[in-house]
Image (cartoon, coloured by chain):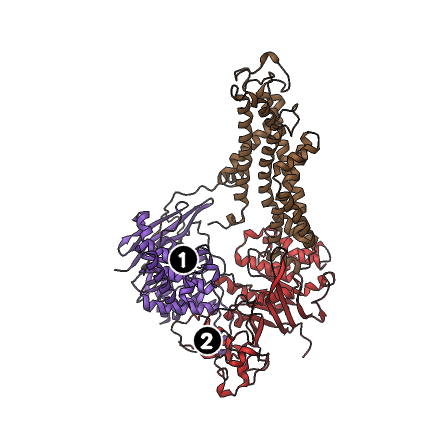
Amino acid sequence: MSQPLLQVNDLKKHFPIKAGFLGGTTGYVYAVDGVSFDIAKGETLSLVGESGCGKSTVGKALLRLFPLTAGQVVLGGDRIDDMPNGTLRPLRRKMQVVFQDPFSSLNPRMRVRDILAEPIRNFGLAKDAADLEKRLEGLMDKVRLPRDAINRWPHEFSGGQRQRIGIARALAGEPDLIICDEAVSALDVSVKAQIVNLLQDLQTELGLAMLFISHDLAIVEHMTHRVAVMYLGKIVEVAPKRSLFGAPKHPYTEALLSAVPVPMPGAARERIILKGDVPSPINPPKGCRFHTRCPYAFDRCRTEEPQLRPVADALEGGHIAACHLHDRPAGENPLSGAKGAQLLAVGSA
Amino acid sequence: MALLEVENLQTHFRTPDGINRAVDGVNFHVNAGETVAIVGESGCGKSVTAMSILRLIPEPPGKIAGAIRFNGKNLLDASDKEMRAIRGNEISMIFQEPMTSLNPVLTVGRQIGETLRLHQGLSAQAAEDRAVEMLKLVGIPEPQRRVKEYPHQLSGGMRQRVMIAIALACNPKLLIADEPTTALDVTIQAQILELMRDLKHRVGAAIVLITHDLGVVAEVAERVIVMYAGRKVEEAAVGPLFRNPRHPYTQGLLGSMPKLGSSLTGEETRLAEIPGLVPSLKKKIPGCVFASRCPKVTDLCTQYAPALEEKAPGHVAACHYALREEVVAA
Amino acid sequence: MDGGRTAPLPPGVNVAPEMGDIMPPVKAKKGFIGFLRRNPTIAIGGFLVLLMVFVAVFAPYLAHRDPTALAPALRTREPSAQFWFGTDMLGRDVYSRVLHGARVSLTVGFSVAFCASVIGLAIGLVSGFIRLADSIIMRFMDGMMSIPPILLAIALMALTRGSVGNVVLAITIAEIPRVSRLVRGVVLSLREQPYVDAAVASGTRTPMIILRHILPNTLAPLTVQATYICASAMITEAILSFIGAGTPPIIPSWGNIMAEGRALWQVKPYIVFFPAVFLSITVLAVNLLGDGLRDALDPRMAKRL
């Protein structure tokens, strides 16, 4: 296999908590605490998890919107995690972002034309004024907005149309990778489908890789090639989509799948309702971070942190999970076998 | 007689650039102990409908017309004093954002107790005892300790449980839940939905569930009303609605949702799109409200608004073509 | 009623009953008139401010007499057809003096608002973007804010010669901490906006981020703040003049006129009354304008029903 487009190794981001008169650091929020993954060219990797698990922080850290605490990030062969800003600036072209909120992600005081021209100018992509114009028209066509809408202001558009402008801005730099940070979460169902389809078409057309950060498992399953599940700043499971949805190998993934409401009234499905809430990332639990809510936790989970390792009875290769249960014989492992269909009520009702 | 009967409800707002007809002629009823979901996308009028039932619409700029009969009494004729006696007592409401709907400077116990003291005249001690009982009912561990805590000391899921406890404190006959789980994480949402299912059996209040999430509807509702652009376009029991949606909008909504488990069944198809945008409610729409986005639209639709017709027993839809096609297909 | 209906209604088709409107139609006014109708505070405030500007600009033509001309024979005349606002103890026409006083007040108000906004904006932008500068500048501003602005202005005036320019300078310095705090707060919240993150990710350099994404979005709250500063500067100017620490007595300003009329307040209240009314109306007008602008520029209003 050739070198992946993006390699992330042991990424950490700890936010200091400032308090007191002199603003001394009294502790850290362990938002992202050792995350590793890679994304191949043209591939979609989804990062799923609940709010506060650190998935959005991963996206922002990769974009170097703030300095990293530790870890390596290699983008297209260049190590960008400790690169000075000046050297990094031209490389930013390769990795662009689409944010969640279609209202705050566009500068209200800039016309669509200026919003889209900004990255083209920054990266010096247009040869001359005519080329810039051609590129702008091309961008509007790509996101299926009328060309003459380019001279309008963001507030003249609906949420879905604004999201299209956000996507066009991300495409303006001709990136290799787009980070979609909950890019469709704030949209209405019918508009969401339009944007999902658009993103899929663009990916096929332009061969883009995507890091799809989302909490919506149904959309993730529809969009992605592989899934990484995060919990409290750590990745607990990574797998190709069919393997993850068909046979989840981490108790948290299993609970997530069973918790998603499905639009099938009366569907017979196995329900796992987790107790309690996600612990605070300021003071994460010792051992396995999930042990406080895990229905299968045993002594070892409370003391020893499990590592991500390949799972023996996965549906497909490349399925890794961090759970001590897989060290047990199959008969004593509640995660053995393929339970995905029961959890998702596939084929019932 | 139904517990709640809404008849020709119109809620309009005066805005500088025209009248916003947020709800325009909606009819439905809720029987005692029944869970009815109102679904639709943002701006369809589902929340305005809920607020109108409790007369929480500021007048002006808003105005409510029609009839809202609760136990036979038209709430639109009730005095402000009578409405205050009904709100939080016979009809109570749960909001989407538990943090902003709770008072940050009062303990949880005080907030639950307040409604009880106001409506049922309980003493301070009796109200607190009942508050502990309510917290226990909604599954909050250590209720004796939690009752003395402030909202910021609770997690999002706990706050929503407290909201439910406040809403249920006076044994309401009708509970209006406006997007009760939208702000919550999926595992917490599962807890709250489980709680709502459980409480439905134990408390016996009728529930009007306002949501945009069809998955949540399928999990808890018995009957579903689909709203679009201020009108009711379809209504049916939950099973028939999901299995056999009649209105093109409902069909479009269900088709545009990705199915969980699609990678296992191999039915990974492109999502159906509903093209275009919701029409502006500030202009009169002469025909069917969905005509501008409907794949089956004809001249008939753009000129004559379809009436709600019973397409199957208990299944009504407002579409000129919903029934005919079935007939042709048969 | 069915004017637009061309398709025949096939038999058996149920048409929904038409819903009438339950409130009278809204006559949506477009353009400038519509804007003023929707924002009556801007219309009233703006009109009064413009009126005062007109008075100040054309004071020499509107005035009946030279505001500084002494006429001992005509001392302390009551308001009459000849002396609309009466005359003061030196026989000067109060009406003419009040009109000329508008010049001082408005000059001070507008100049302070402009200077304090520009300097405060620069300081606020720097401290919103540079961490190290922020901690130093903001501690200094905290120190300045611990002194009441009026005291600070009096102290600064004590160091210099009384002139309108020095009054502007003194009040500007006293107002800067508040503006820079406001701008800094706005900058810090704007920096968290996703569109700023997106601009960083698309390779925009920091100076351009400030110029293109931060600065234009601080202007709305700053404009509102500037109107409040304008109003407060006019009051401060009047106070300084009243206690003799502001505009030199030769120049008629509302504070000076009131100070001179103070001794006769019991017997000739009109000398104090008319400049006071003008000051109040002007300050009220500027504040109304500010409130109206705040409502009109509030982004939440864009999403109204």
Q: Chain of mark 1?
A: B
Q: Is residue C274 left or right of residue C3?
A: right
Colour for chain B in the figure: purple
The quadrant the N terminus of chain B occupies is bottom left
Task: Relative to B284, say whether B144 is above or below.
Answer: below
Percent position (x, y) of residue A220?
A: 53, 70
Colour for chain C in the figure: brown
- Residue A199 is marked as none
Q: Is residue A275 left or right of residue A3?
A: left
Residue A105 visible in rendering:
yes
Colour for chain A in the figure: red
The residue at the far top in this view is: C73
Task: Provide the residue designation for mark 1.
Answer: B46
Q: Chain of mark 2?
A: A
Location of residue C146 by image quarter: top right
Percent position (x, y) of residue A129?
A: 71, 54
Location of residue C297 by image quarter: top right
Percent position (x, y) of residue A221?
A: 52, 72
Q: Nearer the viewer, residue A158 or A74?
A: A74
Residue at the image position 33 percent from the left and 53 percent from the top: B118
